[in-house]
Image (cartoon, rainbow, N blue to C red):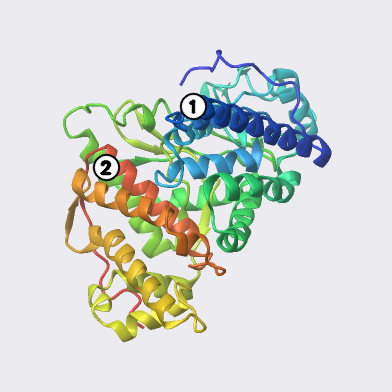
Amino acid sequence: MSANKSVKEFDKIPVTKVQRASKFIATGAKIGTNYLKHYSKKLVNPETSRAQLHEDNARDIYNSLSELKGSALKVAQMLSMDKNLLPRAYQQKFAMAQYSAPPLSFPLVVKIFHQHFGKGPEQLFDTFTHKAVNAASMGQVHQATLNGKKLAVKIQYPGISDSVRSDLAMVKPIALSMFNLNPAEYNEFIQEVEQRLMEETDYRLELNRSIALSEKSRHIKNLVFPVYYPEYSSAKILTMDWLEGKPLGEFLGKPLPEGLGQKLGQALWDFYHFQMHTLKTVHADPHPGNFIVTRDHQLGIIDFGCVKVIPESFYKLYFRLLDRDLLNNAKELEKVFYKLHFIYPDDSSDVKAFFIHIFTQLVELLSRPFEKDHFDFSDSSYFNSLYAFGEKLSNLKELRESKKARGVKDALYINRTYFGLYNILHDMKTHVQVNPVTALGKS
């Protein structure tokens, strides 16, 4: 890793509701201006595309969210992972939230340390970088040394935990109007997002989960985990070993050394398989910025901020969808779809038939990697089908205009986890040994 010297540091973040609301209002005004420019051009040239409009809006939204940081920027990061939800301009710009956002200035970092430890970082550690080596949506990372050991110190941005609920309320109009999200689904799922984001702002919780999940997963081949240091951690500061290497994202989309994609991809699959089906507690933020490829080509897991604990009742229901016999049993499948809220008792027969057809197709597509003992994630035809179907879903009038949320909130982060995992494995061209789960959820 290297310090990000190309971006401006921030001396403060808008923390009050008035300050943050003003920033959202200013962003809305910029978006309105962009639309006026677009339609003015279209009057002159009816063939004008929306590409420039998307680029202008993506830039203005991202720049504003970068200053706000926190949950609003985190939502942008989540949206960028869904390659079917956003135009490419938004995907590319919002994806920057996974790796870099303008970092805090060093005096503000010192102030945060004094609030939590009564002394500055240079009094706690032998050395401490003045510039952040990485700055993302919820916090930034500095490198430190102590007694010859190199450490990573993550510092949460001020005011983040206090602004989660209000930020999500203010980002709602942008999400609904610009990204064609279903209001019923947004209202249902945003509660789940809010809960996960509140957990992410509690570094003591992250510390405990990081230690527990690391210890339980250390047996998995080709994975490494940092050691965590409770004595140098607090509610807003988290200290762990520094893992030497490069972010996984730097390896994706490029020719990899012989066998590396296979080795790392299988390790990643095994890690998620173990969490899902044994621990039922899952690292639910599988974007490439959360993984490090070490110098000896191991996969380092460096961020347990976003963790989903899977309720047992939901687990049994959700993973019944892996049972291929279920898809051929219309009566049983309908029962499961009712429980997962894909359909509702008061749906008309036409609406029910429509959504049963759509979600059966979706389940078949997403569960295809589990059909056999091995699956080739480099198969472009599979991903073309996946993306094409996702694009179809995003444009379905029936789905966008439904007055009900189609799906349960517990599925949100599980679906997101699998989607992120599939994309990484595809980029690494991994052929995985699936180790299919037998007799799962057949209660």
- Left or right, 316 with respect to 115, comes to left
Pick the residue in front: 426 or 169.
169
Q: How far is mark 2 from mark 1, CA to CA?
A: 30 Å
How packed mark 1 is, by other alpha carbons closer than 10 Å (few <14, some 14-19, many 20 or more), is some
Q: Amino acid at mark 1?
A: Gln
Would you place residue 210 above or below residue 326 in this image?
Answer: above
Of labels 2 and 1, the one closer to you: 1
Q: Toward which corner of the image does residue 157 lie, by quadrant?
A: top right
Residue 443, quarter of picture: bottom left
**Considering the numbered disc 2 on the image, is that residue within a helix, a strand or a loop?**
helix
Q: Which residue does the image show at 45% across and 76% down from the upper left?
A: 343
Residue closest to the eye, 231 or 424: 424
Which residue has dot 2 on it? 426
| Extreme-bottom residue of the structure | 331
Disc 1: which residue: 52
* Residue at the image position 17 percent from the left and 60 percent from the top: 373
- Is residue 21 in sight in this rendering? yes
Q: Residue 1, which numbered label?
A: none
Residue 410 appears at what percent x and percent y? 51, 65
Vertical comparison of 306 with 184: above or below: above
Question: Furthest residue to the top?
Answer: 5
